Image (tube, grey):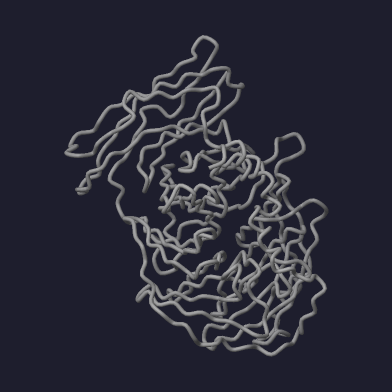
Amino acid sequence: MNKKITYAVLAALAISIFVIIIDIQIYQIDSNKKTNQNSEEQKDTAEDQHTLTPRKTPYLTLYSLPTGSAPNSILVDKDGMVWVTSSKFKTLYRLDPENNTIKKYQSTQVDLGYMSWAMIQDNSGFIWFSQFGPDSLVRFDPSNGYFLAFHPKDSPFQMKYDTRTDDIWFTTLSGTLGLVQKINTNSDIDSYKITEFPLGNNTQTTGLSVNDDSIWVTELEGKVVKFSPVRASNGTITSIVKTLEIPSEDKSSFSLPTDILFAKNDTLWITEHGPSTLTKFDLHAQKSVRFPTAKSYYHVATLPFWLRSSLDNTGIWFNEHEGGSVAFLTNNMTLTEYRVPVVSQDETSLMLNLSQDPNNPNKLWFSLWSLDEIGVVDKSVLVPFEIHPKDSLIKFTKDKTQNIIPLEITKSNGISQNDTVYLNASSTLDSSAELVNMTASFSKDMVNLDNMTEPLAIKLALKEKSVQKGNYTIGINIGNDQVTRTIFVRVIVD
């Protein structure tokens, strides 16, 4: 494996869009390729339905797709079917998780297979997905297998669907905010109006959150922007108005923000690719707090990517692009990371996209681009261990360069699993979650849960060594190669 510094550099370079996109070049896309705007819809080939044998961990179920398929955008529809696109084959797959059968859909009229990044389902049951390539926006009818291509000026990247208005919003890496509106009750291509609003040079919009009539986007240059749509009397959106830009000129910017989620209490959650953190931004105080993931299994920057609010309102889901984990942060700020098992040390689980199961708030599906797999995590499966801190805030001064944090480890009631778990610490001091210029020493860094019946007291000694003044977050991690729990301590260095 490459050294962590190499990966930190790649993290910055990859954002152009994330090193993986280079793979698209094998298609030799002709930007001048003309496609028939009103070409006939093409029914799928209705072939290749067969049964998959999943591999499982206590928390994950993984399904292998054909070798080289490189899955990306993924969606669980209202009927529980799992749809996923191949980035290299001209194929849309449908998995029925009830019987593990998979079927592929292809088209001779719509050009598929150009790295699809987002997928949504509208109120009519149509499935929409965006892709880089000539047919950059595709609508699929699962009831009859028909594909229909649309051609916005810029390729959509992220998409979000507004169930109230039937509007589809999308971002582009070219710096526009796009919109698809249904303008009549028919279902052909002329029934939709696509509008693209230029946002200016060097905007590169990525993440997107729709909250009532507020549209939030992230821009890779380090901004979060809020827009409000302007509607005509017939409901058609004619323009958008910028109502807020974060940060203001005198504040530091976000570092390569990739996604955004508007939450209750006027809080924004943002994934920052640069420092590999999940960031909470208070709109009232105009202040942010960064939270680290646990250190990656691969000793690289984890690169948190897409965000979803849990359907049961208990927390937030996100995936780690290079960290090999899908994560859930509860409302009480406990982070659980479910690790994808790899066959060898040479494998890296490049996790690209995720989708919630609308019928089960405990389940989240995800795509593994590099492993040709898709998977699902079930957060209802109990984790057999917990960790609790006695202090949530510590301070370092020139007279106090070491702090002792008492911890308590417990084994979950009703769990019979016996296992060895390891303690570690991560931080927001470095993009690979290392404790730069700080050390962490546990009184015991390995715990065997076998026959553990009483809480176990452990001490963590944090020692500061010339850390720059500021506010930081330390993650205290406990886990194994399958799952990790992290609790957070705020650190002030004066």
| Residue 429 against residue 367 in the figure, above or below | above
* Picture quadrant of residue 108: bottom right
Image point 62% across, 41% down: which residue? Answer: 284
Q: Quadrant of the C terminus?
A: top right
Number of labels in the image equals 0
Residue 77 is left or right of residue 420, and the answer is: right
Q: Position of residue 245 (x, y in %)?
A: 73, 47
Task: Looking at the picture, tell me which residue is in the foreground, 8 or 387.
Answer: 8
The residue lying furthest to the top in this view is 399
Image point 77% across, 57% down: which residue? Answer: 175
Task: Looking at the picture, tell me which residue is in the foreground, 308 or 157.
Answer: 157
Q: Position of residue 399 (x, y in %)?
A: 51, 9
Image point 47% across, 80% down: which residue? Answer: 103
| Residue 249 against residue 219 in the figure, above or below | above
Q: Position of residue 58 (x, y in %)?
A: 31, 55
| Residue 129 against residue 418 in the figure, above or below | below
| Residue 80 against residue 434 in the figure, above or below | below
Task: Looking at the picture, tell me which residue is in the foreground, 477 or 419.
Answer: 419
Q: Position of residue 373 (x, y in %)?
A: 47, 63
Residue 58 is left or right of residue 347, and the answer is: left
